[in-house]
Amino acid sequence: MSEVITREETDSVGFGETLIEIDGLTKHFTQGEGLLSAFFETETVKAVDDVTFDIAKGETVGLVGESGCGKSTLARTILRLLEPTDGSVLFKGKNLAEIGGEELRSMRKDMQMIFQDPQSSLDPRMKVGPIVEEPMKAHGLYEGEREERARMLLEKVGLDPQHYNRYPHQFSGGQRQRVNLARALAVNPDFIVCDEPTSALDASIQAQVLNTMRELQDEFGLTYLFISHDLSVIRHISDRVAVMYLGQLVELAETDELFENPQHPYTDALLQSIPVPDPRARGQRGVLEGDVPSPIDPPSGCRFRTRCPKLISPPEYDLTKSEWEDVRRFMRAVERKTFEVEGEASLRAEFFPDGTPGGEAGRIVETSIDEVLEDEWETAADRLVESFAEQSICAKELPAYEVDPEFGDGPHLAACHLHREGGGETAD
Ligand SMILES: Nc1ncnc2c1ncn2[C@@H]1O[C@H](COP(=O)(O)OP(=O)(O)OP(=O)(O)O)[C@@H](O)[C@H]1O
């Protein structure tokens, strides 16, 4: 077999240099546009909002977050499969919005995507060899040596090149994902977005495919954006990890730093909810309170604040740490109606064992207790949220801070006001 090009020698971007610059990238979906908008209100889903980060050539950035937080939308907007609402993506220094024609076609070739479901992305009527050759044909590349290259790629991804003439259904799920890898590599890309590529596979197969992906990365000089909601997969594969919540990045750091020294309460909660094999260590799960708010009307300031166990006390009340914890816990419980009222004494014993705070905060809490006792939950919840949660810096300002890393020396971004100058904890 001839020496087929793997790493691109003529690349303008060196290993470790910035390959992709994502700046203020925003993608909103407007629903109810068109004819029906006269009858229905239009609603805007803020799927991705003001996301900024770089990806260096040769690295793997893991992108993690709960379902619906915008991971796929972000990836597709980076690749310009979706038109951004705002912001820019520079690939090898070129703004994809400002180039066209042959240059754009060539850039598109350099950016590929692999999806979760290897079955649906392979045409069942085509043999795998021609499937791998398809992108080469589409881009007019490797004329005369396509079959040879397809066989080489099948081998590189861990399949038997003799299987060139087999159909997708003759392969297992893991093997089909390997065919997808071979197809993505066909046009010698620089950058591959992997959207949950191993989520549909059994754990042991998953690990094998991930290992192959790492080997291919070294050999082909690839850069990955790797999307998963599975933190152990993310830890295994990533050099750096970006954590997304409700359309925004909340934390970004080198992998060890992020896992060993998380600085955003959302990351902390995600890490604590990783299933643990030791049954004695269970019971730590379910640390995330409440549901993810709607991306149509996300919370102001820090979007995680409505579920955050570290919501910062509004300074005007001058509460001690334990007073604030009592107030915050009561406010959340009233908002979500998570308890039954069995009389005033038991309510006070449960939420304010050391008594309610003094001053204005105390007056608000006392009024709310009366309202709950009179079964006016909503009024009490509105009062508490308006007086406390909405007055927090977490509701008023969008956080973005760089913190000192403990592991490695790469920058550590944590979008949490606990890291603002002076810190966020109230002294007890
Ligand atoms: N074409 C669309 N039109 C309207 N809303 C959309 C569209 N695509 C995605 N959304 C919404 O945007 C938000 C982000 O969705 P997205 O699929 O990017 O999240 P995700 O993190 O990739 O989720 P998952 O892990 O479940 O794939 C969701 O609220 C989703 O309902």
Image (cartoon, helix red, strand yellow):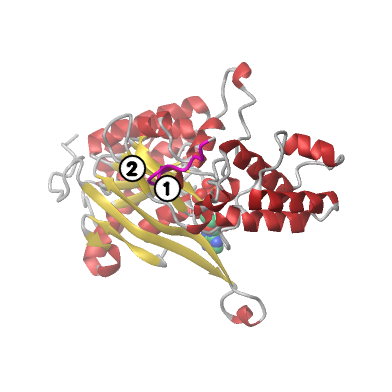
Residue at image x 21%, y 54%?
Answer: 92
Residue 137 appears in the rendering: no
Between discs 2 and 1, the one toward the N terminus: 2
Q: Quadrant of residue 74?
A: bottom left
The residue where tag 2 is placed is 224
Q: Amino acid at mark 2?
A: Tyr
Q: CA distance from mark 2 to mark 1?
A: 24 Å
Q: Amino acid at mark 1?
A: Ala
10 Å crowding of disc 1: few (<14), some (14-19), many (20+): many
The disc label shown at residue 322, or none: none
Query: Left or right: 116 with respect to 57?
Result: right
The disc label shown at residue 415, or none: 1
Query: Left or right: 133 with respect to 73?
Result: left
Q: Which quadrant holds the N terminus?
A: top left
Q: Which quadrant holds the C terminus?
A: top right
Q: Quadrant of residue 237?
A: top left
Residue at image x 30%, y 44%?
Answer: 185
Q: Main secondary structure of the magenta part?
A: loop
